[in-house]
Image (cartoon, helix red, strand yellow):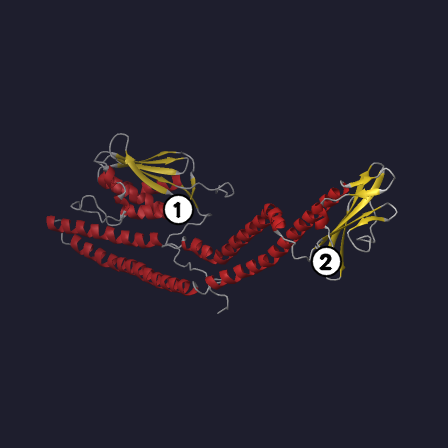
Amino acid sequence: MSVLGSIKLRLIALHLIAVLAVAVVLPLALYWRIDAAARTLHERALREQAQQIARHLHLSPDGTWMLDLPPDLRELYSAGYARYGFAVLTQSGKVLFCSCKNDEPLFRSDPQRERPSYFEQDAGEARLFGASVPTQIGTTTLWVQISQDQAHRDVLIDDIVGEFLPHVAWVVIPILGALLGIDLAIFGRTLRPLEVASALAQHIGPTRTDLRLPDAGMPDDVLPLVRAVNQALDRLERGYIMQREFVADAAHELRTPLAILRAQLEALGHQHAVLELIGDIDHMTRIVNQLIDVAEADTLTIAEGDMADLRSVCVQVASFMAPIAVSSGKSIAVTGAGDPVWVVGNPAALFQAIRNLVENAIIHTASDTTVDIAVRPEGSVVVTDEGAGIPLQQRELIFHRFWRGDRRRPGSGGLGLSIVARIVKAHGGSISVHDAPLRGSAFAINLRRPTMTASEPR
């Protein structure tokens, strides 16, 4: 038994791996975004401060540079506050004004570019981040250096957070969406064995009792259930086989005694009582034969390569049933297509199904009428009688085993039409009943035509 055998443990373990991966990626992405937003804010603030100082620079009449800062700015850049510092440099690097006591540049390596440049350096306990901003005053270019001590107690992150939140969504939402997609893939992969077993279970039936649910790759939580179901299917298959064999064996065993009994009765003469007994034996023999047909129909399987000429089968049925029809004052006709009509099917099984329909039609049709077997080119056959017809409310029931509309009518065990329905179903076809054009009933069997890739026998 594997450690991660159960569905719950698999989902938890795989989901935990996904969450851990996201837990690593998400902080890195957020840190990168926060750092970029904070740096952008600092750079903008320093540029604005440099421009603010530049607005208070002017050249006196005697050619001396003057800087008149208002009291609030002097307080902001005072040495006592020690959060901000500034210096004004000429193109030659000379310091004109400085908030420092030593009148030195804040950044000695200032390249004095035409665009603002930024610097980071440590100065004792201070962690300075600064900018050098070129300022054009008249025809003279001065550089205003601004620095901020990021280790100062008054440096807050409120502005950074406010600037960061509108931009963080594009990072978080895709990551969460990716996590959702990962979850769906994990769940689908974990439950895939159950889906395969479910699809296979739909094909288990009387004709495929050999199928079993696969246990390979099945979670440990579900494996006992799968094995129990397979064991139940084993028992059902054994019981089904025993029942089918019993019916077939019993029917075969009854054939001989019934034949002997009929011969003995015929030897007694043609008294009325004897003829009635012979009729009862014929009825019992017919039921026995139908029981054998039922056992064979339950095991019938049709392969895609099995093909039958529907017209030829119908002609054989008509020839086989003609003596019975004539003896009861009726006739049989095969109409419709004159050429072979190939369908996917077993000729012997189709013969059995159509024979049952014709036999049923002979029983229920009136004397001096014809049972018509119409073969259609699209792969269907319609057996029409001229009997009393079948009420609408009984047209679904007549295909159930042992169902009879009139139980007082002798000679019927209620198996013939159920055998027909079972054979048609095994062929992947359909059967229906409707009113005949004049009177009586018309039973239509629709079968599958061979595919384009299947070659019809010549």
Q: Quadrant of residue 127?
A: bottom right
- Left or right of 412? Residue 77 is right
Q: Would you place residue 343 above or below residue 122 in this image?
A: above
Q: Nearer the viewer, mark 2 or mark 1?
A: 2
Q: Nearer the viewer, residue 222 or 199?
A: 222
* Amino acid type, label 2: Arg
- Left or right of 393? Residue 408 is left
Q: Nearer the viewer, residue 214 or 252?
A: 214
Residue at the (26%, 44%) spot, across then down: 398
Q: Nearer the viewer, residue 18 or 248?
A: 18
Mark yes or no: residue 355 visible. yes
Residue at the (46%, 55%) spot, across then down: 196
Estimate the x, y position of residue 2 in percent, counting from the top left: 50, 68
The dot on residue 127 is: 2
Estimate the x, y position of residue 41 in percent, counting from the top left: 67, 47
Q: Which residue is labeled 1 in the image?
A: 427
- Left or right of 303? Residue 400 is left
